[in-house]
Image (cartoon, rainbow, N blue to C red):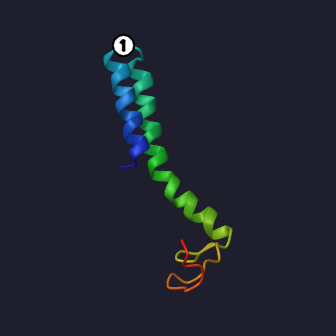
Amino acid sequence: MVPRAEVALIIADLGLVEGLIGQEVFATIVVMVIFTTLVTPPMLRTLFAQDGVRQGESTVDLPPANSDEDESV
């Protein structure tokens, strides 16, 4: 699961246990966490495909890793 979603569920559970939120709010949070966890990856894949970024392609031109240029670092 996504770490951000796990944190949201933990905080929601604490809020429920402490009586800060009710069952309806807790259920809404759980549904939203599940929904965003499932929907976000396909949406991002579609968005990046429309921008012309393909899997494995770099958007930044970098010199080769074994370049002899500027080894003074």
As drawn, the residue found furthest toward the left would be: 17
Q: Is 4 located above or below residue 56 in the figure?
A: above
Measuring from the top left, give residue 50's x and y in whole percent: 67, 68
Quick check: 6 above or below 64?
Answer: above
Q: What's under tag 1, amino acid-wise?
A: Gly
Relative to 36, 52 lies left or right:
right
Quick check: 55 above or below 6? below
Q: Please give the count of numbered marks on the rendered protein.
A: 1
Indicate whether 44 appears above or below 64. Answer: above
Q: Nearer the viewer, residue 18 or 61?
A: 61
Q: Quadrant of the C terminus?
A: bottom right
**Where does residue 43 sit, x and y in percent of width and height?**
57, 58
Q: Nearer the viewer, residue 25 or 12?
A: 12
Instruction: Give me the residue at 60% from left, 64% from top.
Output: 46
Residue under numbered circle 1: 19
The image position of residue 27, as x and y in percent, is 40, 29
Place of residue 13 in the rendered image (x, y in percent of width and height, measured from the top left): 34, 26
